[in-house]
Image (spheres, helix red, strand yellow):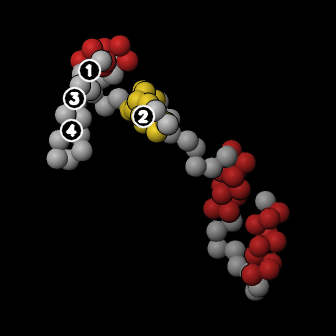
Amino acid sequence: MEIAKMTSKGQVTVPAPIREILNLKKGSSVVFKLTEKGVVFMPCEIRQRETYTQEEWVKIERLVAERGKSYKTIKRAKKHVDSL
């Protein structure tokens, strides 16, 4: 068992033995999960997710290529976007 104190900013230094076991380095991400018995603390990996799917990028590229096209009604514009 290891003990650490919390700073006024809510920060806690993870004791060296725990950092070594969990292979935590500067900049490592961790997750905290509340359970009935306390808090579970474990390393996690955060991956950047694509904002758009490949299919959506194709639609966006088509729209960019057709820049300047105008429609008289919103309905027609929506119909065009849906057809992409």
Residue 5 or residue 29, whichever sits in front: 5
> At 21% from the left edge and 38% from the top edge, which residue is drawn?
6
Distance Cα–Cα, label 3 vs label 4: 7 Å
Would you place residue 10 above or below residue 13 in this image? Answer: below
Q: Earlier in the sequence, mark 2 or mark 4?
A: 4
Q: Earlier in the sequence, mark 3 or mark 2?
A: 3
Marks 3 & 2, CB-CB < 8 Å contact: no
Quarter holding residue 14: top left
Distance Cα–Cα, label 1 vs label 2: 15 Å
Distance Cα–Cα, label 3 vs label 1: 7 Å
Distance Cα–Cα, label 1 vs label 4: 13 Å
Check residue 6 in the rendering and tell me which mark sits there, or answer none: 4
Q: Residues within 10 Å of mark 2 (few under 14, many from 20)?
A: few
Q: Earlier in the sequence, mark 1 or mark 2?
A: 1
Counting from the top left corner in percent of width and height, residue 76 is at: 80, 78
Q: Which residue is mark 1?
A: 2
